[in-house]
Amino acid sequence: MTTSSTRHADPDENPYVEEPPTDFDPVDDLSPEAAAEQAELLRAAVREHDHRYYVEADPLVSDETYDALFARLRDLEDAFDLPTENSPTRRVGGEPLDELETVEHVAPMLSIDNDTDAAAVREFDERVREGLAAAAESGELPGFDPDDLAYVCEPKFDGLSIEVIYEDGEYVRAATRGDGREGDDVTEQVRTIPSVPGRLRGDDHPDRLAVRGEVYMPRDAFEAYNEELIERGEEPFANPRNAAAGTLRQLDPGVVAERPLDVFFFDVLAWETDGDGSNASERPERHRDALDLFESLGLRRNDRVAVVDGIGAAIDYRDEILAAREELNYAVDGVVIKVDALAHREALGTTSRAPRWAFAHKFPPRTATTTVEGVTVQVGRTGRLTPVAELDPVDVGGVTVSRATLHNPAEIEALGVNVGDRVRIYRAGDVIPYVPEVVEKRSEGTYEFPDACPVCGAPVERDGPLAFCTGGLGCPAQLERAVEHWARRDALDVEGLGPERVEQLREAGLVASLPDLYDLTVDDLAALEGWGETSAENLIAELEATRNPPLDDFLAGLGIPDVGATTARALAAHFGTLDSLLDADEAALREVDDVGPEVAESIRTFLDNEENRAAIEGLRERGVDPEPFETDAGDGPADALDGLTFVFTGSLSVPRSDAQSHVEARGANATSSVSGNTDYLVAGESPGRSKRDDAKTEDVPVIDEGEFAALLADRGVAWPPENDA
């Protein structure tokens, strides 16, 4: 049972911990003092609820109650401009970053020696005992008792290793392992992970604590997320480790917040105190005690850690985890065996790359051989064709595998694989199997990739190693995923139009093209299984609200390859109207900042496709008319900054997206990277290093926000923006 002294919030003093009220008085009725006091109570309560939900898996309140508390806290912070540093509301993400800065670790994050052979583990134990005996003989470790040697055994997580630093109990920084000495600063990204506390629990902590952890994506969440990517027609992640690493390196913390990451903490990197006795003054003498302290501080640790007395028991532990591997909701590739006593670790020391007091007993690779019984070609949203080998089912590390990816036509050609061949199957990251080689050729020749789309029959075109269906939105497979994409939050944001409903609408014959969405009626929908009149009316209302979308949302919703929300906005700002974009050739498209030759060709190819063009015209015929991009928003003439190109870096007094919109509304260009066409690099606080280096290389002036404001004032443009909408 958690005691009140180590909780974020004491239920006897905080009304929002147990059976909290959610019928709040209007925010406008509060004084600034009362709002600040209530916000502080809510922050502590939300931290406690986060810990109980994400770390202890023992929630105190319902999801609805939690959402009400969280929303109230956010409303108070917004209404009274309260500080939000390390507030739980920061988990939803902050401003996108220019780049990942490199930072130096407070202590080296070393590798660990490893082997799959138990004999190598026994040799490690011999080295440890010899090293400790030598230290005892030299007087460095007086009174050493070989019987006191204990090991702590932990699963070896297959994720992304990070350093997390707390000062005075407050979260201040996170960084990836990198080369062990320096890593990427991922402070804002890690802040969004629910199981990473923004403030440590209780007071029994050092003034500065650096801990090592492993960020991972739970296996069930990974599989669900990959299904979502596939449904969108996007490339799935190969394994949970790639998913975690790729997510954590996203420059937009908001993207990270939407993905299901979790963390385990497993080691102390630095433990510093100011010596005044106000907090814990000494680091625990044993690793097992440090892990217990992690738990009391709210740092999530793994529940399968074991303390053993001999190396034989450590090897047995490894075999137990190997046997339980399939039960775990996280990927592991072995176990780590660590000397328990801190004094023993210090006596053993480290080499230049690895500690002498730890060893990883790895699991054997997961492979098997079987026969290819067929090849299925799947069609994604962009028309990309992905071949999948249908296999004679085979056990691979305790999991029956009947399908494996062949990636693309080029991979098939490189392997020389065909139906009937014996192949090796490898389970990458414990999840997605693939074919690394043909072990016995039993067929003639290589599988011939189809010349026509297996779904719609349209011709297939090759683009380097990849193949694409040319059917565009006329292909049913692409259509379903295109409709799902159209409805996404970062496109037209049509609530209630998920994958299952889209498939139902297509199979019912109601939606054979994207424009058909706008022919739907309440009666059409209400007649379908699982629909009622209310849900039908809601969807029709959602669709009606998208008949005059902003041009950039319309372009993002079309699902043009290589055109996300940022590029869609750049296109909208440059061309102003849909007709201007439709008439633009590749040369005109390349004039748009951030649109290179390949993206310009991709856009033009999409727009020239007859089915895609018919879909666009069909939408317009049904009254879906995107609004021209607005360029005049007050606070200065619309052409005041005509011809200038700005790049913004660092933190400004307003969000960078607002700064970009402000200058674009007055005729300027705002790009994300510095080039020879850039006129000014505007540097706020903590600017990105690479942009400054690029500015120096390209001889681009670097100005601070004050100089930027003066430049705008000279042209009759106000700063900061006040009237932009």
Image (cartoon, grey):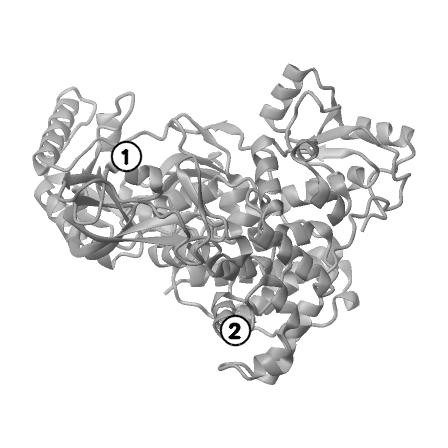
Where residue 227 sits: x, y (%)?
A: 41, 58
At a point 35% along the width and 59% down the height, the residue shown is 220
Disc 2, SS: loop
Q: Are there few (<14), some (14-19), or many (20+) residues within 10 Å of tag 2?
A: few
Q: Find out whether the residues at labels 1 and 2 contact each other: C-beta distance under 8 Å.
A: no
Q: Nearer the viewer, residue 664 or 348?
A: 664
The earlier-in-sequence mark between 1 and 2 is 1
Where residue 251 sits: x, y (%)?
A: 55, 39
Is 265 situated left or right of 49 in this image? left
Q: Nearer the viewer, residue 181 or 41?
A: 181
Disc 1, SS: helix
- What is the quadrant of residue 649 in the picture? top right
Amino acid, disc 2? Gly
Q: What number is the disc on residue 414?
A: 1
Q: Nearer the viewer, residue 323 or 432?
A: 432
Is 214 situated left or right of 644 in this image? left
Where residue 202 sits: x, y (%)?
A: 47, 53
At a point 51% along the width and 71% down the height, the residue shown is 501
At a point 75% along the width and 34% down the height, the residue shown is 669
Whether 40 is drawn above or below 638: the answer is below
Amino acid, disc 1? Ala
